[in-house]
Image (cartoon, rainbow, N blue to C red):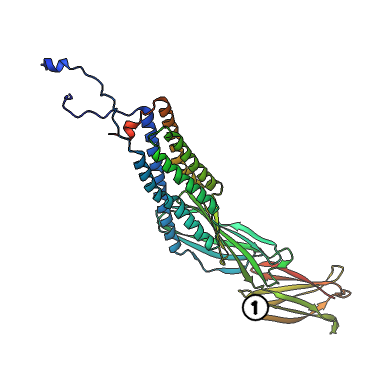
């Protein structure tokens, strides 16, 4: 015996869920403050630790694989780009900034890739240790490559449907 | 059946948004996994260094094939979760005059995780290369040893050790001098004095055969001496050998061979004034 729907229920039309239109984008000031706070660990990770390690090696007579100035330059560039990407995420600049960040990251890794065999001559010991890390760099390049693709997709989305992603990036 | 009072379903994000988000997440996961893997590999590599790879006892001897044989072994413990792949040792040895004595290596092997391996090392060094003979000249040999392996699937590692090792010649400063012929009971004899120092780490036990050869190439006389010279000892002996009639050793040379283990190893000829 089949159930008979009540007249009231039968009267309500079935429809797709309504699109989310409400979202709450943090203020520019808040984003600048939060971005500034995020800058601190970024500087430690991308500049402080690598430069400290390279300086430690140089102080012990072991040349780092790439110049310390290059490490500083890319560290600063990546930190600034990542922070700007965060601050400008609600805007149409997010996609290009995501692409730029991933591109700089890939370039940084490429520089490491072309010098991917690192030989350390231990002073006074007639011993040289060489370590190749080409495969490691290639693995590390997967992340920025995916991020680059994601940035392109976001750019396409922002161009074709501006602000479409905001309800999902900043749900109310 | 959904009720109008149930919470509204969260709408599905657009396709491009979902694709971009998935790619970003995949990238982050790949980065985190790589960093964790590298950290584990690094910690494991320290365990290998701490396990103290060891070089076994070595022995050096003159071989029947006319070379210097060097035998030793290399033991490596791998108490980690990663195999040591493509492990091999390469040797390049130069003598004092820069002549290449050896460029050889051990077969490539793999050391599985949680196991140990002992790699036998057998090297055969030719007695001479260039102008410097290992038989008669004490010298320093340039040893370059490379240990190559791949660890953690990602990292090819090479350790090069360059050393100078003293070589003591088994017939160091060999001199063979021929004295003036003397008449002894109707035959002409010449005194042949042989002297050297066994500076090697092994004894000279065998026979030293020699021939006095004229400048025209004719063998005037030949004889042999039984040797039992301990390592690090000098040796001098004189043997009066008869000379074939009509053979004049002046201007010729003394050719000698060290006969050991059935092999005849020629020594550098000595000119007769």
Can residue A53 be seen from the camera position used here?
yes
Location of residue A102 with respect to B237 vertically, above or below: above
Quadrant, the N terminus of chain A: top left
Say which residue label 1 marks: B228
Quadrant, the C terminus of chain A: top left
The x and y percentages for residue B25 are 37, 39
Q: Counting other residues with Cα less than 10 Å from the Cα at mark 1, is it few (<14), some (14-19), or many (20 or more)?
A: few
- Helix, strand or loop at label 1? It is strand
* Residue ranking furthest to the front: A29
Location of residue B206 with respect to B46 vertically, above or below: below
The x and y percentages for residue B247 are 87, 74
Residue name at image x 39 percent, y 40 percent: A87
The x and y percentages for residue B1 are 17, 24
Residue name at image x 46 percent, y 34 percent: A96
Q: Chain of mark 1?
A: B
Q: Is residue A122 left or right of residue B38?
A: right
* Residue ranking furthest to the right: B246
The x and y percentages for residue B88 are 53, 56
Q: Of B24 and B240, which appears nearest the observer? A: B24
Residue name at image x 62 percent, y 62 percent: B124
Can residue A133 be seen from the camera position used here?
no
Q: Is residue B244 left or right of residue B228?
A: right
Q: Of B27 and B100, which appears nearest the observer? A: B27
């Amino acid at each position: 015996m089949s159930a008979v729907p009540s007249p009231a229920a039968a009267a309500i039309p079935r429809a797709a869920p309504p699109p989310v239109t409400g979202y709450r984008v943090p203020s520019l000031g808040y984003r600048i403050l939060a971005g500034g706070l995020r800058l601190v660990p970024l500087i430690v990770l991308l500049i402080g630790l690598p430069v400290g390690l390279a300086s430690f090696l140089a102080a012990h007579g072991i040349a780092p694989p790439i110049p310390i100035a290059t490490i500083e330059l890319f560290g600063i560039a990546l930190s600034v780009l990542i922070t700007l990407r965060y601050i400008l995420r609600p805007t149409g600049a997010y996609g290009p900034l995501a692409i730029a960040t991933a591109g700089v990251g890939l370039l940084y890794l490429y520089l490491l890739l072309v010098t991917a065999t690192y030989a350390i001559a231990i002073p006074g010991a007639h011993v040289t240790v060489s370590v190749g890390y080409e495969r490691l760099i290639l693995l590390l390049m997967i992340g920025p490559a995916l991020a680059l693709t994601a940035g392109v997709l976001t750019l396409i989305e922002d161009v074709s449907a501006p602000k479409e992603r905001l309800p999902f990036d900043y749900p109310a | 059946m959904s009720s109008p009072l149930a919470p509204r379903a969260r709408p599905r994000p657009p396709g491009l948004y979902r694709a971009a988000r998935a790619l970003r997440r995949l990238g982050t996961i790949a980065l985190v996994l790589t960093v964790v893997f590298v950290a584990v590999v690094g910690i494991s590599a320290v365990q290998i260094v701490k396990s103290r790879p060891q070089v076994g006892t070595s022995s050096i001897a003159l071989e029947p094939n006319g070379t210097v044989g060097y035998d030793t072994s290399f033991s490596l413990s791998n108490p980690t979760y990663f195999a040591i792949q493509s492990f091999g040792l390469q040797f390049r040895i130069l003598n004092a005059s820069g002549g290449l004595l050896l460029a050889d290596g051990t077969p490539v092997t793999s050391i599985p995780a949680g196991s140990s391996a002992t790699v036998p090392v057998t090297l055969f060094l030719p007695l001479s290369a260039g102008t410097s003979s290992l038989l008669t000249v004490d010298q320093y040999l340039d040893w370059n040893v490379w240990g190559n392996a791949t660890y953690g699937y990602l990292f090819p590692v090479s350790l090069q050790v360059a050393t100078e090792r003293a070589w003591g010649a088994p017939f160091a400063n060999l001199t063979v001098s021929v004295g003036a012929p003397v008449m002894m009971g109707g035959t002409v004899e010449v005194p042949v004095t042989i002297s050297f120092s066994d500076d090697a780490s092994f004894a000279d036990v065998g026979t030293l055969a020699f021939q006095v050869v004229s400048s025209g190439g004719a063998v005037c006389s030949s004889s042999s001496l039984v040797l039992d010279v301990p390592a690090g000892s000098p040796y001098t002996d004189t043997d009066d050998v008869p000379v074939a009639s009509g053979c004049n050793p002046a201007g010729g040379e003394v050719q000698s061979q060290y006969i050991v283990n059935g092999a005849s190893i020629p020594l550098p000829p000595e000119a007769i004034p």
